[in-house]
């Protein structure tokens, strides 16, 4: 079984990020790392391929400046190869363009039995790329998966809900977004890190993928403003003088929540 995992390479969350004030987008000119959200997808893919007894895990990533550090981390975990979509023309690309480019790279690579992404990235957070990619590829889309089983050419997924999970079945190939924490991502071993240095990463441009209208020109949206999140207001303290419960009930009634 062959699985492709979409891995986003993001600015290190431990280092303070900076916005480009002219575009209101995050500056991504420094070193990028593997988004932790995607390490779960990589681990899940490795486990599924292992269980299937054959096949391989490939990666696809779109990132500026030919950045491969995050890809190398996922290769060190055990993925076999990667595709990097990197092209100065991509600057300003929105989530839909990203989905189109990832889908085109997956098609160019010959597709896979399963395509895995995270439910949302840690820096962009739109939570829309996997579903748009499925639409572009014309494949079933399963979201918020917390467990996956492949058998008889079908995918069974436990789809996380607020109350528990739904059992979802679909045909393969399919695009699945997995939730964080579904599996324990392995740490790359020293041997894995050394092996990752020579694993193939194919770099492609938008033109190679035949995707036109990318970058700022292709973005259907503009980021008009970025502001500070509102500071949390201090809460209301209810002193219990023996009738504290009544004050809380009155407070909640006033908010019309009970
Ligand atoms: C007008 C506009 C301009 C923008 N300009 C830029 C820019 O110049 N540079 C820039 O870097 N960003 C830019 N962005 C942000 C960029 O579009 C999003 O970060 C990106 O499209 C993915 O969205 P997301 O992270 O919210 O994806 P989500 O849907 O939250 O991601 C879910 C999962 O999809 C997969 N995925 C998402 N993105 C990628 C990727 N790039 N490679 C591989 N897998 C991926 C991963 O598995 C990820 O965990 C811009 C956005 C807008 C609206």
Image (spheres, helix red, strand yellow):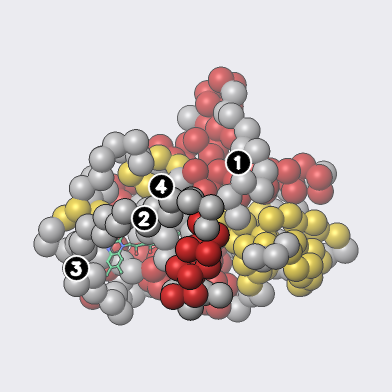
Of the two numbered discs 4 and 2 in the rendering, the one whose residue sits closer to the viewer: 2
Of the two numbered discs 1 and 2 in the rendering, the one whose residue sits closer to the viewer: 2
Along the line of sight, which residue is nearer the eye, 211 or 45? 45
**Which residue, given by chain and number where applicable, does mark 1 sit on?**
79
Along the line of sight, which residue is nearer the eye, 163 or 54? 163
User: Quadrant for ligand 1?
Assistant: bottom left
In the current view of this chain or complex, which residue is farthest to the front?
242
Residue 239 visible in image: yes
Splitting the image into 4 quarters, where does residue 149 fall? Answer: bottom right
Q: What residue is rendered at 29% in x and 36% in y?
A: 15
Q: Mark 4 or mark 1, which has the lower sequence index?
A: 4
Q: Position of residue 23 (x, y in %)?
A: 17, 63
Q: What residue is rendered at 65% in x and 38% in y?
A: 184
Of the two numbered discs 3 and 2 in the rendering, the one whose residue sits closer to the viewer: 2
Q: Secondary structure at mark 2?
A: loop
Q: Mark 1 or mark 2, which has the lower sequence index?
A: 1
**Which residue, given by chain and number where applicable, does mark 2 sit on?**
235
**Which residue, given by chain and number where applicable, does mark 3 sit on?**
225
Q: Mark 3 or mark 2, which has the lower sequence index?
A: 3
Q: Position of residue 194 (x, y in %)?
A: 52, 23
Q: Position of residue 224 (x, y in %)?
A: 19, 72
Along the line of sight, which residue is nearer the eye, 81 or 186? 186
Q: Which mark is residue 9?
A: 4
Q: Mark 4 or mark 2, which has the lower sequence index?
A: 4
Q: What residue is rendered at 39% in x and 53% in y?
A: 237
Q: Secondary structure at mark 3?
A: loop
Residue 62 visible in image: no
How many angstroms separate mark 1 from mark 2 (CA)?
48 Å
Splitting the image into 4 quarters, where does residue 179 fall? Answer: bottom right
Along the line of sight, which residue is nearer the eye, 185 or 64? 185
Asked if the residues shown at circle 1 and circle 2 are in contact, with their CB atoms under 8 angstroms apart, the answer is no
How many angstroms separate mark 3 from mark 4 (CA)?
24 Å
């Amino acid at each position: 079984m062959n699985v492709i995992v979409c891995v986003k390479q993001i600015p290190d969350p431990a280092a303070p990020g900076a916005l480009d004030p002219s575009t209101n987008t995050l500056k991504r000119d420094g070193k990028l790392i593997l988004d932790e959200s995607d390490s779960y997808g990589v681990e899940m893919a490795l486990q599924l391929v292992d269980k299937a007894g054959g096949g391989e895990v490939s990666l696809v990533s779109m990132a500026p400046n030919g950045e491969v550090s995050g890809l190398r981390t996922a290769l060190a975990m055990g993925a076999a190869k990667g595709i990097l979509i990197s092209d100065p023309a991509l600057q300003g690309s929105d989530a839909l363009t990203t989905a189109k480019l990832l889908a085109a790279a997956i098609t160019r690579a010959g597709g896979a039995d399963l395509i895995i992404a995270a439910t949302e990235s840690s820096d962009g957070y739109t939570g829309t790329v996997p579903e748009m990619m499925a639409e572009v590829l014309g494949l079933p889309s399963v979201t918020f998966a917390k467990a996956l089983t492949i058998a008889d050419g079908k995918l069974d997924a436990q789809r996380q809900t607020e109350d528990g999970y739904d059992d979802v079945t679909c045909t393969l190939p399919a695009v699945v977004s997995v939730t964080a924490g579904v599996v324990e991502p392995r740490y790359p071993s020293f041997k894995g890190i050394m092996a990752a240095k020579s694993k193939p990463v194919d770099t492609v441009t938008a033109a190679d993928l035949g995707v036109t209208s990318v970058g700022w020109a292709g973005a259907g949206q503009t980021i008009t403003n970025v502001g500070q999140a509102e500071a949390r207001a201090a809460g209301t303290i209810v002193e219990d003088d023996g009738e504290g419960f009544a004050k809380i009930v009155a407070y909640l009634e006033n908010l019309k929540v009970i």
